Amino acid sequence: MNRRTLMTALAAVPALAAAGATLGATPAHAADDYASNTALYKDPTLVEGVDYGRRSRRHAVDDQNPAARAGIVRTTVIAPHGGGIEGGTSELCLAVAGYHPADLAPTPAAGPVHDFWMFEGLRSSGNSALHVTSTHNDDTVARAMCAGSLNVLSLHGCTAAQAGLETGAAAVLVGGLNPVLRQYLTEQFAEAGIRAVTASGEEEIAGISPDNICNRSLLGMGAQLELTTELRTALFAPGRNTRTERAANTLPLFWTFTNAVRTAVQRLEATQPVL
């Protein structure tokens, strides 16, 4: 089955064809310091490896895997604002992809590994200036990986106020254009006892623009998770929630969250046979 045939077949599945039209309006988001990742990379005052970093992993092609033979990746996990920009999202990206964030060993829960990509702020302070909104993410590796994947899951951080929730709310907002993945994520979070809210409002939170990096998949849709500061804080040991210490100081809730997301992804992949 070639890529065009695969996309046509999957789009014909009623559940996957449904639109995420209930996520709300998308007023303009405040401008970033950089109009794109390309603009950031061209800034001569920034040094890769000092101010920011990029990490990614693509897995070797398995000739026994029909999807791999067709050049198709089932799922890619990304963290566009990792490191010190939206704390905790780098660690979650690695764990959801199947790796322990401290040493990249296989995660405690058995299961497949996924491709991943992340952009990270590495400064001791001022990392928010490195934020590039997801609709402007033009990193060539990120776009290529997403474009070759059936599913993209993007991890983000926000405040309770940005999420439109009450002060101190520990919750995850579920957005993006893939209604089936949103449904599975919401169901798995409920089963895990994690508060999940359907994302609405501006594009930065809801992830409903086709230009959002999470929706630049083979199917033109993906999922975006926005974790409030309070939820992200609860994932790591008190006093160890820093960019350099988080990875080795995860709490049980971190793995509960990770396993909920991985289960949702596996449920989705089970509906996507590649023959």
Image (spheres, rainbow, N blue to C red):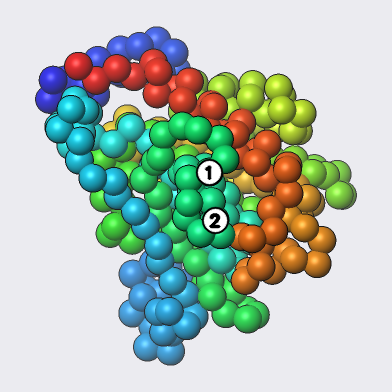
Name the residue type under label 2.
Pro
Quickly name the residue at label 2. Answer: 101
Q: Nearer the viewer, residue 8 or 269?
A: 269
- In which quadrant of the rendered image does the N terminus lie? top left
Q: Give left or right: position of 150 versus 171.
A: left
Q: In screen coordinates, is 169 left or right of 22?
A: right
* Percent coordinates x, y for residue 262 in the rendering: 53, 33
Q: In the rendered view, tell whether residue 92 sits above or below residue 153.
A: below
Quarter of the figure with the C terminus: top left
Which residue corresponds to the image point at 49% horizontal and 80% vertical from the top-left?
51
For the point 28% across and 59% down, which residue is it? 140
Eyeballing the image, is 66 above or below 271? below
Nearer-the-camera pick, 182 or 65: 65
Name the residue carrying label 1: 107
At 40% from the left edge and 79% from the top edge, which residue is drawn?
A: 48
Q: Are marks 2 and 1 in contact (CB under 8 Å)?
A: no
Left/right placement of residue 164 relative to residue 219 reads right
Task: Give me the residue at 39% from left, 16% from top.
Answer: 271
Q: Quadrant of residue 68?
A: top left
Distance from Cα at disc 2 to Cα at disc 1 = 9 Å
